[in-house]
């Protein structure tokens, strides 16, 4: 048995076969002086051991808030979960006390934050910060904790780890700091790792290296990995499934191949179209018109309707429910669009070239 895994934890004594983490119909709001910010409006997703789920969306779509809710990091007030469940190994985390949530954090579900400079404490050496987690949470001696911190820094390929143990965060490059953050997140061997925009501040080469490292660690440790990003291009090689979020809701959920081959929601199509393509040099990149809606005052009906080129009257009047696409379009695939069945059949090439597409009804399309 791995010496770093505590055999007293009952849930580790038997094999859990279901999804490790399930978020079900989660509603969360921030009650502010300006009004009620409806940050999550029925978010559902799940992830199993050995699986990578990418959660994708623009800023303000609720992807980071949902991760913070999973970890119990949101202060109440102003944050309130008004409905839904967050289950870890089948157990609902929401009724747990703050101390019980703290026990889950890091040991069962850990997070790599997007801004390593502010997540790391600037006045303590990086090695010390990793070791401290092991001393406090695992009860290791100072010497053992430092030894394990060196191993973890080696694991995430920080060169000359032993010599760099006593370096401060400002002495690390952005990529190395992010590796240190990953080492810290792995210190307690969490079965679930959430990486929140782990490569945002990094250049593309370092970005690719960090993604490769995360994928490798996930495979080696059979972890459930949740990768939060706004960049559809980043997740193509690493994710198994993608949950696309808009206005605090998952609007499309499918395996990676299906989403790239035939997106079933206009928002996903818009994101795909705005990816740079090597064969379209010199062309202006298409973008989704308009801005994400204010979560203080969501538009009526489908919250994407003010920006959607396919919007029709029903879109303004009725909130679309999740539609399950036919199994031939991949198992369990959903889209929260009134016209999911039609959208998924639109040719992607035409869309990308910006040509208009007509449907059999000859309507707005
Ligand atoms: Fe567009 Fe209507 Fe679908 Fe919303 S429901 S994404 S407005 S077509």
Image: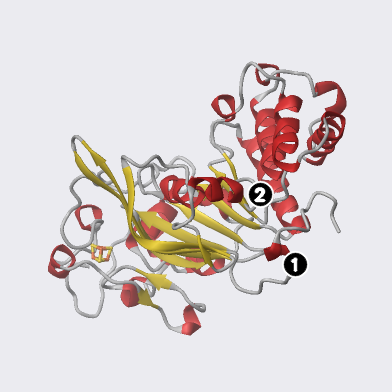
- The residue sitting at 78% across, 19% down in the picture is 166
Q: What residue sits 61% from the left and 23% below the top? A: 121
Please tell me whether mark 2 or mark 1 is closer to you in this view: 1
The picture quadrant where one finds residue 30 is top left
- The quadrant of the rendering that contains the N terminus is bottom right
Foreground pick, 335 / 271: 335
Residue 160 placed where, x, y %?
A: 86, 26
Q: Which mark is residue 107?
A: 2
Task: Name the residue located 51 percent from the left edge and 79 percent from the top edge.
Answer: 331
Q: Which mark is residue 220?
A: none
Q: Is residue 326 above or below residue 63?
A: below
Q: Quadrant of ligand 1?
A: bottom left
What quarter of the picture does the C terminus occupy? bottom left
Q: Is residue 51 above or below residue 81?
A: below
Contact check, label 2 and label 1, Cβ < 8 Å: no
Q: Secondary structure at mark 1?
A: helix
- What element does badge 2 sit on? loop
Q: Quadrant of residue 255?
A: bottom right
Which residue is identified by label 1?
13
User: Between marks 2 and 1, how big is the CA–CA gap?
Assistant: 15 Å
Query: How are the residues colored?
Result: secondary structure
Q: Can residue 43 be seen from the camera position used here? A: no
Residue 204 lies, in percent from the top left, at: 61, 36
**Residue 337 versus residue 123: which sits nearer the camera?**
123
Given residues 332 and 268, the one toward you in this image is: 332
């Amino acid at each position: 048995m791995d010496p770093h895994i505590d055999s007293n934890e009952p849930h580790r004594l038997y094999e859990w076969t279901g999804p490790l983490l399930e978020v079900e119909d989660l509603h969360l709001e921030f009650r502010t002086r300006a009004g009620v910010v409806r940050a999550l409006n029925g978010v559902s997703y799940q992830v199993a051991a050995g699986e990578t789920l990418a959660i994708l969306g623009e800023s303000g779509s609720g992807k980071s808030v949902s991760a913070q809710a999973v970890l119990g990091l949101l202060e109440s007030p102003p944050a309130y979960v008004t409905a839904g469940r967050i289950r870890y190994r089948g157990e609902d985390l929401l009724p747990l006390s703050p101390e019980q949530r703290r026990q889950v954090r890091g040991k069962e579900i850990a997070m790599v934050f997007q801004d390593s400079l502010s997540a790391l404490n600037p006045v303590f050496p990086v090695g010390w910060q990793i070791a401290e987690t092991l001393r406090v949470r695992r009860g290791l001696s100072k010497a053992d904790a430092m030894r394990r911190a060196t191993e973890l820094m080696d694991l995430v390929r920080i060169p000359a780890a032993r010599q760099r143990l006593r370096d401060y965060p400002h002495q690390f490059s952005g990529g190395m700091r992010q590796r240190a953050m990953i080492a810290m997140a792995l210190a307690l061997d969490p079965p679930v790792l959430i990486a929140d925009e782990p490569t945002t501040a990094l250049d593309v080469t370092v970005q690719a290296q960090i993604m490769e490292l995360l994928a490798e660690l996930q495979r080696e440790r059979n972890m459930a990995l949740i990768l939060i990003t706004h960049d559809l291009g980043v997740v193509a090689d690493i994710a198994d499934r993608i949950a696309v979020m808009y206005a605090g809701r998952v609007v499309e959920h499918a395996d990676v191949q299906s989403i790239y081959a035939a997106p079933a929601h206009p928002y996903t199509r818009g994101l795909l179209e705005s990816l740079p393509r090597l064969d379209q040099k010199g062309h202006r990149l298409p973008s989704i018109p308009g801005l994400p809606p204010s979560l203080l005052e969501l538009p009526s009906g489908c919250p994407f309707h003010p920006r959607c080129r396919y919007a029709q009257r029903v879109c303004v009047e009725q909130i679309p429910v999740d539609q399950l696409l036919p199994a031939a379009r991949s198992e369990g695939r959903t889209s929260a669009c009134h016209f999911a069945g039609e959208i998924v059949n639109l040719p992607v090439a035409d869309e990308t070239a910006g040509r208009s597409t007509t449907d059999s009804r000859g309507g707005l399309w």
